[in-house]
Image: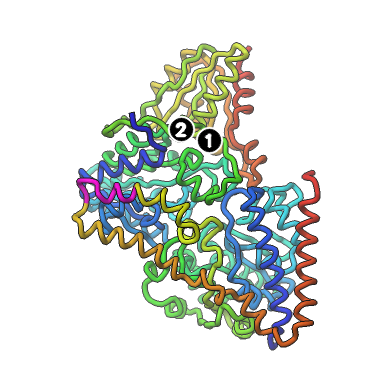
C-alpha cells in the first residue's frame, strides 16, 4: 500500500485547523484547565491512523484530539466535550485528556505511560476476539522512562501481541530536555525488550505511513509488536501556556516575575558554595536557552507546512482541498458555538 | 509582618531547613524549573530533576531516607501517586514496623492536590483519605501559608514518611502553571486567607496532629481540611445571617487525626458536619464519624464530600465538590 499524500495532508490540515480553533477558545477562557495540543505531531498521527480500520483500537495519551479527528470521530462532539457541555463526547465529564470513543475502540489517559499497558490489553482482546485487528499506543519519548511502558513492551513481545507502539519524540519531558533524563538509546531499549524498531521521519506523513505499513502488516498477521519512533516538535510546547515558551516569547512580561526572587535566592547567605550556585543558575538559564534555540520556534519543523510545500505543483487542487477543509472546520466550530448550551 | 503565598511559605520553610541540614535534598520531575530559587541557592547536588519515572524515584526516595538523606520527593500531582503507590504502601509506611522500630524512612512527599479549576478527574483529586488509610504515613493538608511553612518544617523533622499536600487552588504558582497558563480570561473562586497570609520571620515546626479552631460556633461544628476549611468559613458567614452559629475546625493533618481536638469541638455544639474535598466513602468523613461514635459522643452528624469521579466541566465540578451551598444545606439539615 503506497501513501496518498493528498489524503494524508487533508487529515493533517483538518486536525491543525480544528486545534488552532481550540487554542483560541482556550485563550479566550472557554476551555478550562490544561490544554495539550497535537500541533506538530500531525504527520505521525496521520501516517499511522490511515492504516486503521473497524476493529482496531487506539490507546491515546493526553493529546487525543488529533487521532480521534483523523479516525473520523464527530468533531462537534469533541469540541463540545472540550467546552464541558452535556452533549460532548463524554457529556462534559472527561475533558480533553479523557476522550473516549467506544465505537472506534479509542480511549485516552492523562497518565504518562499508561497507553503502553492499555494497547497491550486492546491487542490481547483483538488477538482473541477479532483476529487480524491491531492496537496502537501513542506516547512521547518521556513516557519511555515510565516503568509501565517498559513492562508493556516486554509483555507485548512475550505474548506476541498485535500492537504498534508509536513514540512521538519531541525531545522534551514537559520542561526538561529528555536526553538529560534518558539513559542509553530508546531504540536499543525497545529491541532489548524484544520489540523491533522502525525509525521514520516524524515530519513526513508519507515516510511515517510507509514505515507503519510494514509494522501493521506484521501485527495483523501474528508477527507481534513493533515500535515506530519518529521525531517531531510540539509547536506550543508541552501545553498551551507552557512556561518556558512564555518566557521566550514574552520575556518582558514573564521575566520580572522570575528573576528578582531567583537573584535574591542566589545571593542569600547559607547555601551552596558560589561555584555550585553558578552551576544552578546555569542549569536554569540553559533550559531557557534550549527553549530559545528550540526547533519549536522554527516553522521549518512544522509538518503541515512541509507537506503543503510538497503539494505546490498543483495549486488549484490544493486550494480546493484547503478551502473545503477550512469551510468544514469553520462550520463545525460555528455550529457548536452558535448553539446555546442546553 | 511579611506575607507570603502558600507555596512561597512552604518553599521558604524548606529553604530554612536546607540551610540548616545538608541532608535535605529535593528531587522530582521538572524540579530545576519549579524550584529554581532553591536550585540557585543550594546547587544541583541538592535540587535536581528526575525522569518521568515516579515508581523509581519515589522508591529511591524511601531507601535514600533510610540511608541517611532527608529527601523531599516532588510529584506533579497527588493523582500520579497511583503510578508509584507501592513505594508508599508497601515500603515507606512499613520500614519502621518491619525493622522492629530500629529503622526509619524520613522522607517528605510533596504534591499539589485538589480541583476547582476544571482539569478533569485524573488531575483534580485529593486522595488524602486513601493515603491516611495506610498505617505509618503522616498526611498533611495545610489551609494557610503560615500552616504550610510550619507543617512543612514539621514534616522535615519527622522521623517517618510524610506526605505534604498543597491545594492547587491555594497555590498561586501551581494554579498559574496548570490552570491559567498565563491567561487572564479565566476566574477561580480563591479563598484569600488561604492563598496569601502572614508568616513568621523564622519558621518553627508546628505539631503534627493538632487541629485548629478557626471559628467558634454554638449550633454546629464544621470539620474540614485545606480548601474545605475556607469554604466552611464562607458557609458559616452565610449561616450567621440566618441566625445559625457555626464553628469551623481545621484538622490540618489527616493522619495523625486530632481526636481530642475533634471531640472537644464536637462536644461544644453537639452537631458535626464533616466537609471533605476527598471522596466520601471510606474516607476522612467516615473516620470522623467513627471517632465520635467510638468515644460515645451523642452528636448529630452529617457530611458533604465527593461522591463521584470529579467532572471536567467547571459547573459540574463545582457541584461535585463541597461548595458553600452544599455545606450550608448540610448544616441546616442538622438543626432542629
| Principal secondary structure, stretch drawn in magenta | helix
Chain at tag 1: B
Foreground pick, A40 / A184: A40
Q: Is residue A94 visible?
A: yes
Residue B103 drawn at (x, y percent): 24, 46
Secondary structure at numbered mark 1 = loop
Q: Is residue A229 above or below residue B58?
A: below
Determine if the magenta segment contains residue A265. yes
Residue at x 65% of width, y 80% of height = A307
The residue drawn where x is 38% and y is 43% is B163
- CA–CA distance in space, label 1 to label 2: 8 Å
Query: What colouring does the structure picture have?
Result: rainbow
In screen coordinates, is A296 left or right of B307? left
The foreground one among A8 and B279 is A8
**Mark 1 touches mark 2? (CB < 8 Å):** yes
Residue indicated by mark 2: B194
Residue A6 picture location, percent across and down: 73, 81
Q: From this viewpoint, is residue A216 visible?
A: no
Tag 2 secondary structure: helix
Q: Nearer the viewer, residue B167 or B34?
A: B34
Left or right relative to A260: residue A172: right
In this picture, which residue range is highlighted in magenta?
Answer: A261-271
The residue identified by callout 1 is B190
Indicate left or right for A236 with A18 as reference: left
Q: Which residue shows up at 39% across the image and 63% down it?
A: A287
Which quadrant of the structure image shows residue A288?
Answer: bottom left
Where's the C terminus of chain A, which quadrant? top right
Check the picture and name the quadrant holding the N terminus of chain A: bottom right
Are the residues under badges 1 and 2 in a single subunit? yes
Amino acid at each position: 500500500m503506497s501513501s496518498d499524500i493528498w489524503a494524508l495532508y487533508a487529515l493533517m490540515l483538518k486536525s491543525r485547523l480544528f486545534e488552532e480553533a481550540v487554542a483560541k477558545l482556550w485563550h479566550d477562557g472557554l476551555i478550562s484547565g490544561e490544554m495539550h495540543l497535537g500541533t506538530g505531531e500531525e504527520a505521525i498521527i496521520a501516517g499511522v491512523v490511515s492504516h486503521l480500520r473497524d476493529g482496531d483500537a487506539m490507546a491515546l495519551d493526553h493529546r487525543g484530539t488529533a487521532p480521534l479527528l483523523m479516525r473520523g470521530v464527530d468533531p462537534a462532539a469533541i469540541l463540545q466535550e472540550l467546552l464541558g457541555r452535556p452533549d460532548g463526547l463524554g457529556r462534559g465529564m472527561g475533558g480533553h485528556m479523557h476522550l473516549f470513543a467506544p465505537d472506534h475502540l479509542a480511549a485516552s489517559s492523562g497518565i504518562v505511560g499508561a497507553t503502553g499497558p492499555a494497547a497491550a490489553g486492546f491487542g490481547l482482546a483483538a488477538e482473541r476476539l477479532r483476529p487480524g485487528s491491531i492496537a496502537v499506543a501513542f506516547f512521547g519519548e518521556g513516557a519511555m522512562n515510565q516503568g509501565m511502558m517498559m513492562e508493556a513492551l516486554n509483555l507485548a513481545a512475550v505474548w506476541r501481541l498485535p500492537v504498534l507502539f508509536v513514540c512521538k519524540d519531541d525531545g522534551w519531558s514537559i520542561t526538561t530536555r529528555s536526553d538529560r533524563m534518558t539513559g542509553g538509546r530508546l531504540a536499543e531499549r525497545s529491541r532489548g525488550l524484544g520489540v523491533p524498531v522502525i525509525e521514520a521521519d516524524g515530519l513526513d506523513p508519507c515516510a511515517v505511513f510507509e514505515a507503519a505499513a510494514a509494522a501493521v502488516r506484521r501485527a495483523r498477521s501474528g508477527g507481534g509488536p513493533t515500535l515506530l519512533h519518529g521525531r517531531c516538535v510540539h509547536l506550543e510546547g508541552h501545553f498551551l501556556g507552557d512556561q518556558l515558551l512564555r518566557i521566550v516569547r514574552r520575556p518582558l512580561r514573564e521575566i520580572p516575575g522570575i528573576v528578582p526572587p531567583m537573584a535574591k535566592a542566589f545571593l542569600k547567605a547559607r547555601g551552596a558554595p558560589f561555584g555550585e550556585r553558578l552551576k544552578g543558575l546555569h542549569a536554569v538559564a540553559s533550559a531557557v536557552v534550549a527553549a530559545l534555540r528550540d526547533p519549536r520556534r522554527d516553522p521549518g519543523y512544522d509538518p503541515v507546512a512541509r507537506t503543503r510545500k510538497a503539494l505546490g505543483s498543483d495549486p488549484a487542487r490544493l486550494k480546493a482541498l484547503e478551502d473545503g477543509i477550512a469551510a468544514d472546520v469553520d462550520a463545525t466550530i460555528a455550529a457548536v458555538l452558535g448553539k446555546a448550551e442546553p | 509582618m511579611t506575607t507570603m503565598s502558600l507555596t512561597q511559605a512552604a518553599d521558604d520553610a524548606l529553604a530554612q531547613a536546607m540551610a540548616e541540614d545538608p541532608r535535605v535534598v529535593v528531587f522530582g520531575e521538572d524540579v530545576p524549573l519549579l524550584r529554581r530559587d532553591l536550585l540557585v541557592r543550594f546547587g544541583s547536588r541538592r535540587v535536581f530533576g528526575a525522569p518521568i519515572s515516579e515508581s523509581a524515584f519515589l522508591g529511591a526516595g524511601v531507601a535514600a531516607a533510610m540511608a541517611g538523606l532527608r529527601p523531599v520527593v516532588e510529584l506533579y500531582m497527588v493523582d500520579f501517586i497511583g503510578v508509584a503507590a507501592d513505594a508508599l504502601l508497601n515500603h515507606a509506611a512499613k520500614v519502621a514496623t518491619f525493622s522492629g522500630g530500629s529503622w526509619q524512612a524520613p522522607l517528605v512527599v510533596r504534591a499539589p492536590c485538589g480541583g476547582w479549576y476544571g482539569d478533569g478527574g485524573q488531575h483534580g483529586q485529593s486522595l488524602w483519605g486513601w493515603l491516611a488509610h495506610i498505617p505509618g504515613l503522616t498526611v498533611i493538608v495545610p489551609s494557610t501559608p503560615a500552616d504550610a511553612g510550619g507543617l512543612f518544617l514539621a514534616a522535615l523533622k519527622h522521623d517517618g514518611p510524610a506526605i505534604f499536600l498543597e491545594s492547587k487552588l491555594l497555590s498561586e504558582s501551581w494554579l498559574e502553571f496548570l490552570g491559567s497558563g498565563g491567561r487572564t480570561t479565566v476566574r477561580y473562586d480563591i479563598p484569600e486567607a488561604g492563598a496569601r497570609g502572614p508568616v513568621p520571620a523564622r519558621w518553627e515546626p508546628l505539631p503534627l496532629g493538632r487541629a485548629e479552631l478557626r471559628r467558634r460556633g454554638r449550633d454546629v461544628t464544621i470539620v474540614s481540611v485545606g480548601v474545605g476549611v475556607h469554604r466552611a468559613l464562607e458557609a458559616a458567614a452565610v449561616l450567621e445571617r440566618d441566625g445559625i452559629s457555626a464553628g469551623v475546625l481545621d484538622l490540618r493533618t489527616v493522619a495523625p487525626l486530632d481526636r481530642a481536638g475533634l471531640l472537644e469541638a464536637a462536644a461544644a455544639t453537639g452537631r458535626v458536619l464533616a466537609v471533605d474535598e476527598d471522596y466520601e466513602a471510606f474516607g476522612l468523613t467516615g473516620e470522623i464519624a467513627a471517632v465520635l461514635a467510638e468515644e460515645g459522643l451523642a452528636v448529630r452528624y452529617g457530611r458533604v464530600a465527593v461522591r463521584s469521579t470529579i467532572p471536567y466541566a467547571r459547573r459540574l465540578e463545582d457541584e461535585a465538590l463541597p461548595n458553600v451551598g452544599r455545606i450550608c444545606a448540610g448544616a441546616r439539615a442538622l438543626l432542629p
